[in-house]
Amino acid sequence: MPGAPPEMAAQMKAALGQAQATEFCLTKEMSDKGFEEMFREIGKGGECKYQRFDVSGGKLDALLECESKTEGKGTIKMAGTVGSEGSDVTVEIDTKNPASPMGNTVIGMQMISKRTGDCKAG
């Protein structure tokens, strides 16, 4: 990681490649809104705009461009499959921030979700 302090580079290196698991309840109401609304939430806040967004036929293809005076410019590409039993989406984040000690960064990740059952009452 060019320009990063050695401690930060070591922390990032340790974190990379580690899987993270999160469990949450997706209610019927949330599910009825579909994947489109969920992925469109990523672009809210005024600094990002979708240049491409297609979620049809069980496929997701999206390109989000962001620009901030303090955070620089970036793109988020999302592609994969989505369905009622889960999703498999690859995300690539490419940022350019001359003010940051890290400068330009590219981060890739894969997000896999699967339905595990109905939400627990309570």
Image: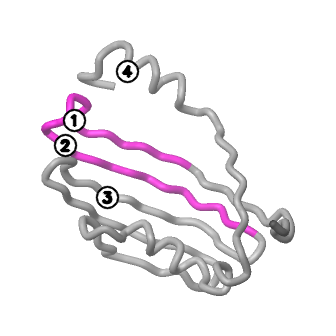
Q: Give the quarter of the figure containing the C terminus.
A: bottom right
C-alpha separation, residue under disc 2 versus residue under disc 1: 5 Å
Q: Amino acid at mark 1?
A: Gly
Q: Amino acid at mark 4?
A: Met
Residue 4 percent location from the top left of the image? 29, 22
Which residue does the image show at 36% across and 43% down from the upper left? Answer: 106
Q: Residues within 10 Å of mark 1 (few under 14, many from 20)?
A: some
Residue 64 percent location from the top left of the image? 34, 67
C-alpha separation, residue under disc 4 versus residue under disc 1: 14 Å
Q: Residues within 10 Å of mark 3 (few under 14, many from 20)?
A: many
C-alpha separation, residue under disc 1 versus residue under disc 3: 15 Å
Name the mark on residue 103. 1
Which residue does the image show at 59% across and 76% down from the upper left? Answer: 59
Instruction: Looking at the image, tell me whether mark 1 or mark 3 is earlier in sequence order.
Output: 3
The residues colored magenta run 86-109
Q: Residue furthest top?
A: 6
Which residue does the image show at 47% across and 63% down from the upper left? Answer: 78
Instruction: Looking at the image, tell me whether mark 4 or mark 1 is earlier in sequence order.
Output: 4
Q: Amino acid at mark 3?
A: Thr
